Image (spheres, helix red, strand yellow):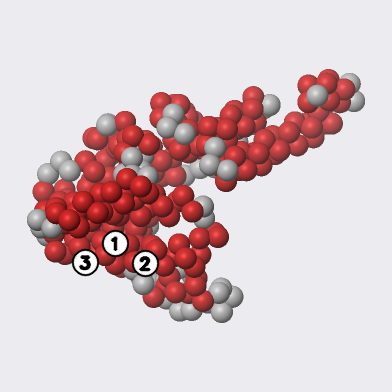
Amino acid sequence: MLMVLAVFVAAAGPFLLDVVKDSVIGWRVQRAQERLQANDPQGAADELTSAINWGGTHPALYRYRASAYEKANNLQASLNDLNYLIALNDSQIPPEEIYVIRAWVQIRLGNVDVACRDADLCVDKQPNNAVYLNQRAYIRALANRNEQELREALEDVERALEISGQGFMNGGQDDPDFPPQFNMQVHQENSAYLDTRGYLKHLLKDHTGALEDLNKAILQTEEEQRTIAFLRGGADYDQALAVMHYHRALAYRALDKQEEAKADFQLAEELGYDPARGVM
């Protein structure tokens, strides 16, 4: 049907053909968003491929598809899109927005050194970006190459917590245009960053300190799941909690608290902990 329509408007001139093309590309992107919301990342990637095949040239389509491929566990396809974007060097997408995805894909592929270099590039570009600081800290934790790097990672996540503690949008002050559950986030530490710090403390053999951070991270994430889960898919919270429980299990085991460790390992598995799928 779409091809018949394209042939029809082609006779009416290139202007109408461009209108139809843009409409189809926009429709495919919308379908991709719907597929992602329905937890079908491969379907989203397929929709974006159709948009590109219809003549979509904006580099954001490739970045979006790279993320969808990563979620679909199609890591090589994701890496291909990211490498294409880096070679393209288009000013419409800052390079750190590409490196931040590629670092995660590379660590999942086991390319530890490349992943760490990509994470470095993100922080080099934006040294005060809490997200990039936390990602580099977590990439270094997963790489676990040496104690010095782990201690540097701990400094990164401490800095990320300091930056995020200044508040989301208003210098740490409540914003009256947001409901209370949003403002609640301003007054507590970011749970993902606490998880990173807790995991790093465990790797550095401060298991008691690790438990303190991980207990807080789990409680806060459970509270967020109850209050603002409508903003994100429930699976996102389940996966975050799966990783946190796994990290806490490691700390419990190191402290010879075997029953607690066993319970957390089991809960992590039930919530979907699975490094092969990127839940790690």
Task: Give, as a three-letter code, the residue at label 2.
Answer: Gln
Q: Are marks 2 and 1 in contact (CB under 8 Å)?
A: yes
Residue named by callout 1: 194
Label 1 CA crowd tier, 10 Å (few <14, some 14–19, many 20+): many
Residue 186: x %, y % from top left: 42, 73
Q: Which of marks 3 and 1 is in front?
A: 3
Viewer-proximal residue among 96 and 215: 215
CA gap, disc 2 and disc 1: 10 Å
Q: Callout 3: helix, strand or loop?
A: helix
Residue named by callout 2: 220
The disc placed on residue 212 is: 3
- Specify whether 279 is left or right of 57: left
256 over 88 or under it: above or below: below
Residue 125 seen in the figure? no
Residue 80: x %, y % from top left: 44, 26
Residue 263 seen in the figure? yes
Name the residue at 53% across, 42% down.
39
First in residue order: circle 2 vs circle 1? 1
First in residue order: circle 3 vs circle 1? 1
